[in-house]
Amino acid sequence: MTFSPKKSTFKTKDMLIGALLRIPAEAIHRRIIHDLNAAGFTDLSLPHMALFRFPGPDGVRPSVLAERAAISKQAMNRLLGSLEETGYLFRSDARDEGRARIVRFTKRGHAAYAKALEVLREIEREWRAELGPRDFAQLKELLFRVWESPLVR
């Protein structure tokens, strides 16, 4: 069953901040995957969003990616393996860091990531049209203040 906030009987005062942030974020992830699939990247699915979200995996150690995604190193290695098999990325030795590995996008990975950014820009245009330029700018400013605050650290 899909949750639809527009059909909800909840009032604004009843909604907690977690849901108000999670529901739009999940909708954005579903849209990105849908549009990536439509653009020919048919082997990408929602779990891959752990790697395709900002700032992306290129040049990052798998352990850091696991921490960012809040998943185990083993789960991250399975995700990385699936994206290696389908040609989106590869792991290589990190220079001057002993046994450390880093993740690198392939040409296909760069193309998929660029498409994801394109979809995000389109989503921003749609939200700006829906909310109006002033309210959309205020929403982004408030979210940026939260991002920069100790509240999310």
Image: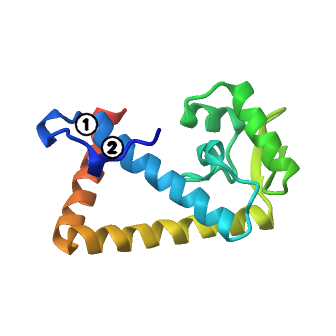
* Within-10-Å neighbours for mark 2: few <14, some 14–19, many 20+: few
Residues at discs 1 and 2 in contact (Cβ within 8 Å)? yes
Locate residue 35, reporting x and y percent.
59, 66
Of residues 51 and 63, the one drawn nearer to the viewer in this rendering: 51
Which residue sits at x=58%, y=31%?
67
Total label count?
A: 2
- Outermost residue toward the right in this view: 85
Q: Secondary structure at mark 2?
A: helix
Which residue sits at x=78%, y=65%?
108
Question: Quadrant of residue 113 in the image?
Answer: bottom right
Q: Position of 84 compared to 19: left or right? A: right
Q: Position of 135 compared to 80: left or right? A: left
Which residue does the numbered mark 2 point to in the structure image? 21
Q: Amino acid at mark 1?
A: Ile
**Marks 1 and 2, Cα distance to the nearest angstrom?**
6 Å
Question: Quadrant of residue 18 in the image?
Answer: top left
Q: Position of 101 compared to 11: left or right? A: right
Q: Secondary structure at mark 1?
A: helix
Which residue does the numbered mark 1 point to in the structure image? 17
